[in-house]
Amino acid sequence: MKRANEWIVGIAVMAVIGVITWGIFAVGDNMRPGVSPFSQDVYVLHNTVMGVVTIIGVLVFTAMFTSIVLHRRSKNPEAAKFSHSTKAEIIWTAIPVLILVVIAIPATQVLIDMENTGDAELNVKVTGYQWLWKYDYLEDDISFFSALDRNSNRARQMGSDLAPTEVENYLLEVDRRLVLPVDTKIRFLLTADDVIHSWWVPDLGWKRDAVPGMVNEAWTLIKEEGIYRGQCAELCGKDHGFMPIVVEAVSKEDYADWVATQQAASTANNQSVTP
């Protein structure tokens, strides 16, 4: 009867801890799956690892609290006398090693995919400045700066007559968006002109530092049309919080039209300044 009661207590503790853990995981903020194959791989890997460590946590804390309850001093005034168990030590060493190996295999594959920037159909150079971004479309000979939009910039000023709550996408809108085609592998070449910045759009599944004198690479393949927002993720100076990123993903046809429009405008501007 005593052994049965101990099992009941253990199962009850495990159930309580499991419910609490599940509740925290279910209602808490999770990673977003994103809109690229890589971001979705990262999302699946994150949830898989989270599930594994949650199960481990439930088992460990259940064993700990069960031991505390069932083997407290008031019930067992005489301490057990034993030194160790070689078999137990082998088991609790082998199981974690096996778990780490199982987790490492898909994690390594995701890391390899992250660095595979080859076979890109479009190359975009991203340069960070204090405090805006410059985008160069290397194949299409298009170049422009992208800075915080006027309404957000106006609302952030002390004494402004425009409240931040009146601005849509406050501090997350720019004057010129980075337009990219969907279903196209795009390579980013990231650098900076002054201090270290970091280009981060959560829906793409990665962020990369933009370091002066260096070029870092990254890639994406956006599967869905839409607007995807991000920010500089490296403290780069007093206006670090005011250099957002906005990616506008469009169809290949719309992208071709946009490129033609940009090139025509650039040609017209060049002709207007030619003496």
Image: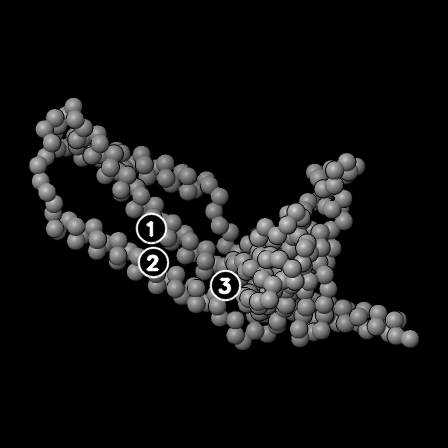
List the single residue furthest toward the top: 74
Q: Work out whether residue 186 or residue 88 is closer to the camera in this orientation and state it.
A: 88
- Image coordinates of residue 14 in percent, x first then y, are 27, 37
The kind of residue on which mark 2 rests is: Ile
Does the CB distance between marks 1 and 2 fall below 8 Å? yes
> Horizontal placement of 69 versus 104: left or right?
left
- Image coordinates of residue 209 in percent, x first then y, are 56, 59
Residue to which mark 2 is pinned: 103
Residue at 77 percent across and 38 percent down: it is: 160
Q: Is residue 100 above or below residue 158?
A: below
Q: Can you see residue 11?
A: no
Q: Residues within 10 Å of mark 3 (few under 14, many from 20)?
A: some
Residue to which mark 3 is pinned: 37
The kind of residue on which mark 3 rests is: Pro
Residue to which mark 1 is pinned: 52
Calculate the distance from the C-alpha at mark 1 to the C-alpha at mark 2.
9 Å
Q: Earlier in the sequence, mark 1 or mark 3?
A: 3
Q: Which corner quadrant of the image does residue 74 belong to?
A: top left
> Horizontal placement of 151 versus 102: left or right?
right
Residue at 46 percent across and 40 percent down: it is: 27
Residue at 59 percent across and 61 percent down: it is: 210
Q: Residues within 10 Å of mark 1 (few under 14, many from 20)?
A: few
Residue at 52 percent across and 71 percent down: it is: 117
